[in-house]
Amino acid sequence: MKKVFISGGGTGGHFYPALSVAENLKEKGFNITYIGTTNGIESKKDFPADEKILYPMRAVRGKSIIGKIQGVFSLLSTTFKVYKQIKKEKPDFSICFGGYTSIPLGLASFLARVPLYIHEQNSIPSYSNKILSYFAKKVFITFELTSKYFNRKKTILTGMPLRKNIIERAKNYVYKPNQTKTVLVVGGSQGAKKLSDSTISLASEMKDIKFILIKGKWQVEVPNLENLTVYEYVDNMEDLYTSADVVISRSGSSSVNEILCFGKYAIFIPFPYAASNHQYYNVKWLKDLGLCELIEEKDLSKEVLKRALEDTFNKDLESLSKKIKEYAIFDSDEKIVENILNDFKND
Ligand SMILES: CC(=O)N[C@H]1[C@@H](OP(=O)(O)OP(=O)(O)OC[C@H]2O[C@@H](n3ccc(=O)[nH]c3=O)[C@H](O)[C@@H]2O)O[C@H](CO)[C@@H](O)[C@@H]1O
């Protein structure tokens, strides 16, 4: 049992967890075929696959009927191509990480009777994963509350596969308050303009706090302030997480899970246009436990953020950190792989 087909791409949110599990399988000696599209993030990034097959594919999106028909046609014809590939290579199983680019592999695996596994990164599942879950042998989820959207019998909580250097650093990390209060502000992989603007105006008022802002791709005017450091993008997120007392962040799945792993108290400002508002639900449960702050973007202003920060620094962040870390799931890639391999042992 040594061959696997993997899909998950379009955006980083689906691509990176696929990559993390692929690295794990590669270490265990699996031969990997990656299936993706020519226009997603996967066309620009390396993937630890023995074979990387990218198909030109249109999403079934938009208002125009013709566009939708073209999308369905593209999906079915890609499914047929993947089916032929599966029949040729005969993988032992397939694993999909969501996004429309996963649908052809999911459907083709089902048609070819190859065991299918899927992983859902968010609290509210994507349409593609909802569809594929009917054909899947197991559905791996990141947040406990997501089980209600799937057949509970095949749903397993494994958490979100994160980068190795983040996990390794977070495992033994214990939070101790800094002498100078330090706040990390990060707006997901792209950055968030509104978050950056509010942070910059706050930094000029709250001079006793050190702000580290990752501004992402957006243009923002950065004043010369001693207590403000601005980056466009950093690769060593683990260094920034450990240097912060508090994180202000979007609530994409990786960000939330990294913050849990480091046990950081965070002020989350969900991206309001995420499908089914999933960023809000990714952290609503944590807010209900009193383990984070949650501000909706419509309510965001410099004053609101200032009040939230002041309230946050009045809390016992050290003991909160321990409680937050209890909800972290480490080694999610290993949990997923173990679960799959166990199925084959039992068969
Ligand atoms: C806008 C949108 O729809 N975003 C979705 C996208 O999130 P998106 O990819 O934006 O956000 P995530 O929070 O999941 O991941 C961001 C990742 O970027 C890393 N990072 C960020 C900044 C930086 O300078 N360096 C760096 O390495 C973070 O450490 C993290 O690993 O996919 C996620 C998983 O499906 C979803 O939950 C999000 O809702």
Image (tube, rainbow, N blue to C red):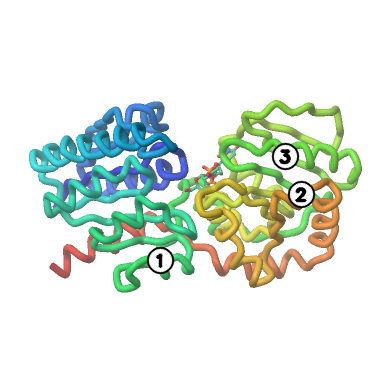
Figure quadrant of residue 332: bottom left
Which residue is nearer to you in this view: 263 or 135?
Answer: 135
For the C terminus, which image quadrant?
Answer: bottom left
Q: Is residue 291 above or below residue 111?
A: below
Dot 3: element: helix
Which residue is nearer to you in this view: 140 or 179?
Answer: 140
Pinpoint residue 226: horizontal percent, then vertical percent. 86, 34
Figure quadrant of residue 147: bottom left
Q: Is residue 317 above or below residue 233?
A: below
Identify the residue at image location x=17%, y=66%: 345
Identify the residue at image location x=84%, y=64%: 314
Judged left or right of residue 79, residue 182 is right
Query: Residues at badges 1 and 3 in contact (C-beta under 8 Å)?
Result: no
Tell me the crowding category of disc 3: few under 14, some 14 to 19, or many 20 or more residues within 10 angstroms, Cα based. some
Q: Amino acid at mark 3?
A: Lys
Q: Is residue 36 above or below residue 25?
A: above
Residue tagged 1:
149
Pinpoint residue 277: horizontal percent, then vertical percent. 56, 54
Identify the residue at image location x=20%, y=42%: 31
Sequence-wise, which precedes: disc 3 or disc 2?
A: 3
* Residue 257 in sight here: yes
Q: Residue furthest left?
A: 88
Residue tagged 2:
300
Quadrant location, ligand no. 1: top right
Identify the residue at image location x=46%, y=39%: 12
Residue tagged 3:
194
Q: Amino acid at mark 2?
A: Leu
